[in-house]
């Protein structure tokens, strides 16, 4: 039988995954446990009145980069992150605007043995499939208000998708750190806050609550973009009010540092 030359068949490699990155913070200490490599992704569907990163709201506000290049940069600091009992946090903007890119980064980080955190409003929680969430060790969930009208006034979006995402994370027993920005005259209604505290306590997976006093450190960015900053006359909350709000979460049985 004569031999027949059969061309070798090489499996096609998957196309590289790329995404839009606004900036990187190395040595972060407030976006999850330990020392963090924080990747700020570009793009966000919300328009929060107090947004301190309005320069990340559109995808084109960032630069396009391959996930492999991001992971190579993370790998260069992986030992430092592990030594600092930290890891990698995906933030933004809203990282779930780019779920495939997030999934690639998270999978690569877990392959390096790094702790991972996802900082999200939860509004696009349905973009986070089980594959993506399997590589997330901690969700930093920003529930910005607990009344529909307040949430819409603050963000321009409905509240329910965020609450549904919180409930899904609870069913998965995925650890959550809840974040709540306290804005005088906007998110300081004690009845609403008590309702949120009760909701969060009932989830069973909220490890801590961070009550974050409103600040205007991002106001200059709004000015640079030529956009009006509606909270220009709003002052940070009184320390006594902040302490009282933290007490409401503690009274519900939640851990408030």
Image: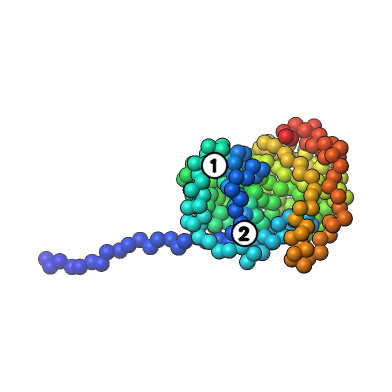
In the rendered structure, the answer to whether residue 135 lies left or right of residue 212 reads left
Estimate the x, y position of residue 249 in percent, counting from the top left: 78, 36
Q: Earlier in the sequence, mark 2 or mark 1?
A: 2
Residue 154 percent across, percent down from the top left: 80, 55
Comparing 222 with 136, the one in front is: 222
Residue at the spot x=54%, y=46% of the render? 135
Q: Which residue is mark 2?
A: 22
Front residue (pair 92, 164): 92
Q: Is residue 170 above or below residue 123?
A: above
Where residue 166 sits: x, y (%)? 68, 45
Relative height, residue 229 to residue 79 (above, below): below
Q: Are marks 2 and 1 in contact (CB under 8 Å)?
A: no
Q: Which residue is mark 1?
A: 81
Whole-number angstrom distance, CA of label 2 to CA of label 1: 21 Å
Quadrant the N terminus occupies: bottom left
The colouring scheme, among rainbow, by chain, secondary structure or one colour, is rainbow
Q: Residue at x 25, y 67 (%)?
A: 7
Corner quadrant of residue 213? top right
Q: Secondary structure at mark 2?
A: strand
Image coordinates for residue 56, horizontal then vertical, percent: 67, 60
Image: 124 above or below 236: below
Q: Callout 1: few (<14), some (14-19), or many (20+) C-alpha neighbours within 10 Å?
A: many
Q: Is residue 5 left or right of residue 75?
A: left
Q: Quadrant of the C terminus?
A: top right
Check disc 1 and report its element: helix, strand or loop.
helix
Residue occupying the point 82% across, 57% down: 153
Mark 2, Cα crowd under 10 Å, few <14 / some 14-19 / many 20+, is: many
């Amino acid at each position: 039988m004569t031999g027949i030359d059969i061309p070798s068949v090489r499996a096609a490699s998957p196309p590289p995954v790329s995404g839009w990155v606004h900036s990187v913070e190395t040595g972060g200490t407030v976006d999850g446990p330990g020392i963090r490599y924080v990747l700020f992704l570009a793009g966000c569907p919300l328009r929060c009145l107090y947004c301190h990163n309005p320069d990340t709201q559109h995808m084109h506000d960032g630069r396009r980069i391959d996930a492999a290049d991001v992971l190579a940069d993370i790998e260069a600091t992986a030992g430092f992150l592990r030594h600092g009992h930290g890891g990698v946090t995906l933030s933004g903007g809203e990282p779930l605007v780019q779920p495939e890119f997030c999934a690639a980064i998270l999978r690569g980080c877990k392959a390096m043995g790094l702790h991972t955190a996802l900082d999200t409003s939860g509004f696009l929680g349905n973009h986070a499939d089980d594959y993506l969430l399997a590589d997330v060790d901690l969700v930093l969930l920003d529930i910005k208000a607990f009344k529909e009208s307040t949430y819409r006034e603050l963000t321009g979006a409905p509240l329910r998708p965020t609450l549904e995402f919180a409930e899904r994370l609870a069913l998965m027993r995925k650890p959550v750190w809840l974040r709540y920005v306290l804005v005088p005259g906007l998110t300081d209604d004690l009845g609403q806050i008590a309702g949120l505290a009760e909701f969060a306590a009932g989830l069973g997976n909220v490890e801590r609550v961070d009550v974050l006093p409103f600040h205007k450190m991002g106001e200059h960015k709004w000015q640079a973009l030529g956009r009006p900053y509606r909270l220009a006359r709003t002052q940070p909350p009184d320390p006594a009010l902040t302490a009282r709000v933290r007490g409401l979460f503690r009274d519900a049985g939640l851990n408030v540092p």
